[in-house]
Each structure stands twice: as structure tokens, then as C-alpha cells.
Image (tube, helix red, strand yellow):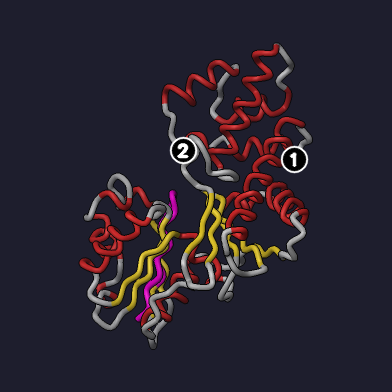
Amino acid sequence: MLVGVDIGGTKTHVRVVPDDAAVQDLVVRSDSWIVGMLASDPGNARRLVGLLPAEAVAAGSALVVGAHGLDSPAQVTSFNRWLADAFPGATLGVNDVALLAPAAGLDQAVCVVAGTGSKVVGHRADGSIVEAGGHGFLIGDPGSAPAVARDAMRALLEAYDEGAALGGLAEAMLAVHGHHDLPELWIAMFVEDPSAALWGSLAPAVFAAAEAGDRRALAVVDAHANLLTADVHRVIRRGALGDVVVCAGGVITGQPLLREALWRHVDALDLGLTMRTLDVPPVAGAVALARRLRDGVRSIA
């Protein structure tokens, strides 16, 4: 039996593929079972296995988990050890971006995810991972929902300090949670609940303002596309293979302005890259890797 899991910042998608039965899908909120950070509590691996159908938890099964929050080698090592202790079959835990190329049916690709967080990942000829970006929305995660909102707020605060008209971007962001003016909004965002979820809730307003032609919103979207492109270029310079850029994540797939701006900037690199938006759930990549794992291949590239 093959088991693939895609753990995002918001939701966890489990897919079980029996040898002779229908595929089973389960989607739950990630915060319904993760305690603290994914790689900070050994109990998270046990709780994840507890989500699986009993018949899938067997010595003959193969389980691959792609997870937002497996960023450092130490985190990957710890989680893989806990996963192996919690599941009787073969197991492998990787960063969720590593699911994109196999989900797209590719052996090699430069993979870009932008949703709750963001990261760019590729693989060298020796199979080693090369990655750039991420690091959390407070300082990074270009193209992610909270980071887009963060930089839109920065642009508005600069205009506010200049005494300039704030325009449609401010109107759109204020309307999300019913705030009356910019000081009320930034106090709520920075003091009352400075969470990625709250910041991310403002991102659709930023994109709506950009669609309506607001110049500040358009500049924010273009800047984030440029930052993602810089990360694509970084992983290629460091040896990442593949001539396809595969994009996934709720923001990059759901916001055409960001996706199209990313392609313009990637095309300007003049590296012969083509771009593909993933049209299947990333969990399909976890299942593809689980199939390889069951066949004795632990490498993800």
C-alpha cells in the first residue's frame, strides 16, 4: 500500500493508494494534529500516523511525507527518525517542495511553491538538494500570502508617513477586517495578533487592488515575482538541474498577476526555462515517491 502526505501550513492532505482498491483522500487542518513546530515534537509523527486508515499502517506499506516546516537538515533528520519509529513500513520525510517535480511527472525541475510560505528547490546531478528562499514571512517567504501583505503594509505606511493619498490598496486592506484607518489596521496586525494566518488574510485584498490597477499593489506583486525569480536563479547557479520551473501553492496558482509576473522575470533570465503550473495536488508527488520507496529507491531525485 502506498501512502503520501502533503503537510502545508494550513492543511494536511493524506492520500492512500491500496493495491486493489479505490484511492482514499483525507484533508484535515494541520493545526488539528501538529503541536508546536512539526520537527520540534516527536509526538507529531505519531499523531500523523494516527490519521491514517488502520490497514495502511503495515510493514508492507510505504509512506512519504512532504512537509512545510522541514527546512533544515537537522529538522529533516529528526522527523525522519520519529517517522520511522511511528510507522512499521518504509518511510521518508522531505520538504513539501520536493513533491512538485514527481507530481508533475518529471525527474528534474526547479520547483517554486508560494502559499502560506514559499521556497525554491532543485536537485543536483548527485541527487543532493539545493534550495533558496523561505525563512518565514517576517524576513522572507517572497510570494507567500503573509509576505505579500507585509510588504503592502510597508508601502502604505511609507505613503502615510509622507502624507500621501493611500488609494485603493488601503481601502481594500482596511475592508478585510472592518478597520477604519491605517493606524488601527497596523496596530491590529503588529500588536494584537502578529500571526502568519492574520497577515495572510490580507493578501487577497492586495491582489484585488492590483487587479484594479493600484500602482502600489502592482509594485508589491512585481517585487515578489522578482524575488522568487532571484531564488530560481540562485538554485540554478548552485547546480540545480532541469529546464522546467514547476509552480504550486495557493498564491502562485490562484493569483494570475503573480504567476504572470514571475514568468516575465524568469523569461528575462534567458536560460531557456519553461514554466508549468502544477495541475494535480502535490500529494500526488508524495505517492510517486512512495512507489519508488517501496521499490527500494530512497533518493528523491
Of 239 and 203, nearer the camera is: 239
Give the SS element for disc 2: helix
The residue type indicated by label 2 comes to Ala
For the point 58% across and 57% down, the residue is 235
Q: Residues within 10 Å of mark 1 (few under 14, many from 20)?
A: some
For the point 72% across and 30% down, the residue is 216
Q: Which mark is residue 79?
A: none
Of 56 and 287, nearer the camera is: 287
For the point 65% across and 20% down, the residue is 158
Q: Residues within 10 Å of mark 2 (few under 14, many from 20)?
A: many
Of circles 2 and 1, which is in front? 2
Which residues are the magenta region? 1-15
- Is residue 252 a member of the stretch shown in magenta? no
Indicate whether 294 appears above or below 98. below
First in sequence, mark 2 or 1: give its number. 2
Residue wearing tag 1:
211
- Is residue 9 a member of the stretch shown in magenta? yes
Indicate whether 101 appears above or below 170. below
For the point 70% across and 34% down, the residue is 217
Of 126 and 164, nearer the camera is: 126
Residue 12 visible? The answer is: yes
Residue wearing tag 2:
196
Residue 13 visible? The answer is: no
Q: Is 244 placed left or right of 35 in the picture?
A: right
Q: Where is residue 17, by image quadrant? A: bottom left
- Residue 193: x percent and y percent? 42, 28
Q: Name the quarter where the N terminus is drawn.
A: bottom left
Give the SS element for disc 1: helix
The residue type indicated by label 1 comes to Glu
